[in-house]
Every structure is written in structure tokens, then in C-alpha cells.
Image (cartoon, rainbow, N blue to C red):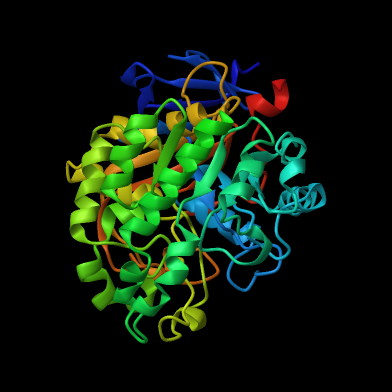
Amino acid sequence: MATFDLKLVGGTVHLPSGPAQVDIGVRDGTIVAIGASGDAGEVIDCTGLDVLPGVIDSQVHFREPGLEAKEDLESGSRAAVLGGVTAVFEMPNTKPNTDSADAVNDKLARAKDRMWCDHAFYVGATNSNAEHLAELERMPGTAGVKIFMGASTGDLLVSDDANLARVLASGHRRVAIHAEDEFRMNDREGERVAGDPSSHPVWRDDESAILATRRILKLAREARRRIHVLHVTTPAELELLAQHKDIATCEVTPQHLTLAGEDAYPRLGTYAQMNPPIRSGAHRDGLWHWLNQGVPDVLGSDHAPHTIEEKARPYPASPSGMPGVQTLLPLLLDHVAKGRTTLARLIDLTSAGPQRVFGLIGKGRLAAGYDADFTVVDLKKQWTVEEDWLASRCGWSPFTGDTLTGKPIGTIIRGRQVMWDGQLANAAHGRPVRFEAVEFG
């Protein structure tokens, strides 16, 4: 009888102690041996490749239900695993919003045997569900509560301090925050220039971001509630957040680390439009400074697809958002190859960081007893992002045509080989992610 269900052999394995040339043994979807010896029912040869802990993307918008022309749970998760991502947290601004127990259960039912990767769903905070959030955040399969302080519409917008305080007072898990100040942005709508998407960061300026971040930090302290500030775009915010690490964690995106407005808006037009905006090269460089100071805790794609027809509308009628779940890891591998950061820091941002911030069970670490989630990469592979590689239903990427160094080769989730060298498994078997706060209160 075989000792293991699966063995990964020949690769450079990135353990908590650092890289090592060891084989990994898997049984019943769990890592059971580092430095494995013995037979296995299946052997995957990773010679010349690096085996990372499974990459986790803790901010995606997969648009289902209600907006499936842009994306759905199947197509978005297919893009994820093709990009080496083993788990995603999906956002609540769907139609209807994910702001009730029924809506969460509906998404979980839709995901079953359709999503290729493991998954969790955020509950959207509203002015009307604030007192119920403590119950909703404890539902299995929920990543916690998401607050939109700006950039949303209707009931998913919680912009004033009184209602923000109500939301923060209900529950205990870390709350994810879109920190742009709705009041300042409303006052500055006149800064938008018709037909000129480069005016987007002029309208949604640095002060819109830093003002909202200051406000939510103050409110979080008063409520004694931990927060997680999403897609930070200004060095000033990261400098501020560095002073509040006891209560606040934060995220940066590959887009803001890669694109600079001086080039992006002339070249990409509205395809570079997202919220918070792509800002200047100086902003981008400042994000790298604070990333290498260790301030950002996680890297999230903020995958937010829109159709080509929608993005082709003249600014400001064009919607904000761009796809990114499939290019999250390739872009960061390229930055590693260029010496902007290290592979160890990449692992911290995409696996250990999410585990630490969100309290994941069995994820984020390549160690015995953890889920057998592996992202296998070729660090030296030079390749070009082509449209036919993209799986998102929207059919485009701001990085199409870019030549990168470093490519995801394999995605293995709970011991199942879901993707290898661009080929998918025969069926999707993603399952809900488990959280310490849900399982153990």
C-alpha cells in the first residue's frame, strides 16, 4: 500500500525556515511529511521549479449573482487557478448585495462544484444591517465584514461617522475597509474632465484617501475593533498605518505597484481607471518603499472586471475596475526577478500574511498538518501575457503584451492538481475556507 496519496519531488520547497530541496508527502488532502520517503499513488515532478505555499487573493469581485456578463464564480475562479491562486475572498457588491444570511448561503450554493479554488465571501455592511453583522460574520464561509466608505452606491455605502460607528460596534472580526471619503469626492466631482481619464486621480485625490483612513482609524480605536484597509494607494497612508499596527492591517495591489499614471492613462485610457485610482510614478515608488519596510500585510488583486464595451465608454461614464486575479502572482514574480522585493516577502504577502490577518485554518503555510495547497512556479520562465491565456469573462487585461519573468506552472489545492502548465483538471472542487473566529468564536 502506498505511504502517501501524493508526493511532490525534486523542487525547491519554501518552508517557514526557508527554501529546501525536500520532497513533500500528502495524505487525505493534508501535508503529512516534509522530506517524505515512501511510495505515493501520484508523483508530481517539480525539478527546476519552486514550490510555494498556496497563494491567497483576499480581494476579488466575481460579479455573481446579477452581473455575470462581466464575470461569474466559475470563470473568475478559473482565472485564479490559472494564475496560481489557491483561495479567494469575494466581495459583496453583487446584485443583490451580499448583505444577509440568505445572500451568503446563495453564493455558497452557487460556488459548490463550480469554483475551481477554495473561497470565502464577505458580508457587505449597510446602514440597515449594522446590528445584525455580529451574527452574519460568524456564518461558515464568510471572510468577515466589508465597509465601503466611498466608491459604492445605494445601501452598500456607509459614509458617515455615526453609521460607521454602529457597524464597528457590531461583531468582533477584523473589518475590511474601502477608505475613500465620499463627502470630499462629492465636493470634487467638478475636477473630472470629460474624455480625460487622467483626471480620475485628480478628482479622487490623495486627501480623499488619507482623510477616510484617518477617520476609520479614530472610529476603530473608539470601538476597539480591528480593521484592514484595502488597496492603499498613497505613501502617506502607509506611513500613518505604520503607527497603528496594533489595530490596523493593510493591503496593496499589483496594479498600484506596477502602473504609473504618467504612462498608464495615455496608453490605456479608461482601461487604467479603478478606485482608488492609479496615481503617479512617485506614488508607486512610495508604495514600494513602505512595502519593503514591511508595512503592507497582504497583496490583493482587487480583481474587478468590466466588459470591453463598458470600458470603451468615454470618461467619466466608464466604470472603474480592472481584472487582476490571474496576473497577481506573475506580476509579483516579475518584480522579484527585477530585484524590487524578495520571494520570501512575496510569500509573506500572499500566504502567511492572509493567514495571520484573517485567522485562516489550515492555509498559508507549507508545514505538516496544513492543507496541501501549493503554488508551483518557474522563476526563470520568460513569457508574454497573451489574450488567449486570460480566462476572465471580460476578455482583457491592462498587462496584455507585457513580457514577464516568472510564471505559475501548477496549482494544487488540498492535494488535488487543479492546474498544470496551463491545463485544468476535469472538474472544479473548490470548498469554503475555514476561519478560527467562525469555528472557535
The location of residue 102, given as percent across then percent down, is 82, 51
- The residue furthest right is 102
| Residue 10 can be seen in this image | yes
Q: Position of residue 72 (x, y in %)?
A: 63, 63
Q: How many marks?
A: 0
Q: Residue furthest front?
A: 162
In this image, 51 relative to 91: left or right?
A: left
Residue 118 appears in the rendering: no
Rendering quarter of residue 28: top right
Q: Quadrant of the C terminus?
A: top right
- Give coordinates of residue 173: x percent, y percent: 62, 32
151 with respect to 268 (left or right): right
**Residue in the image at 36% along x and 63% along y:** 277
**Which quarter of the figure is the N terminus placed in?**
top right
Q: Is residue 182 above or below residue 124?
A: below
Residue closer to the observer: 363 or 179: 179
- Residue drawn where x is 38% and y is 73% of the image: 271
Please identify the quarter of the rendering in which residue 283 is found.
bottom left
Indicate the position of residue 44 as horizontal and vertical percent values.
47, 33
Instruction: Compare residues 46 and 376 and report the one nearer the observer.
Output: 376
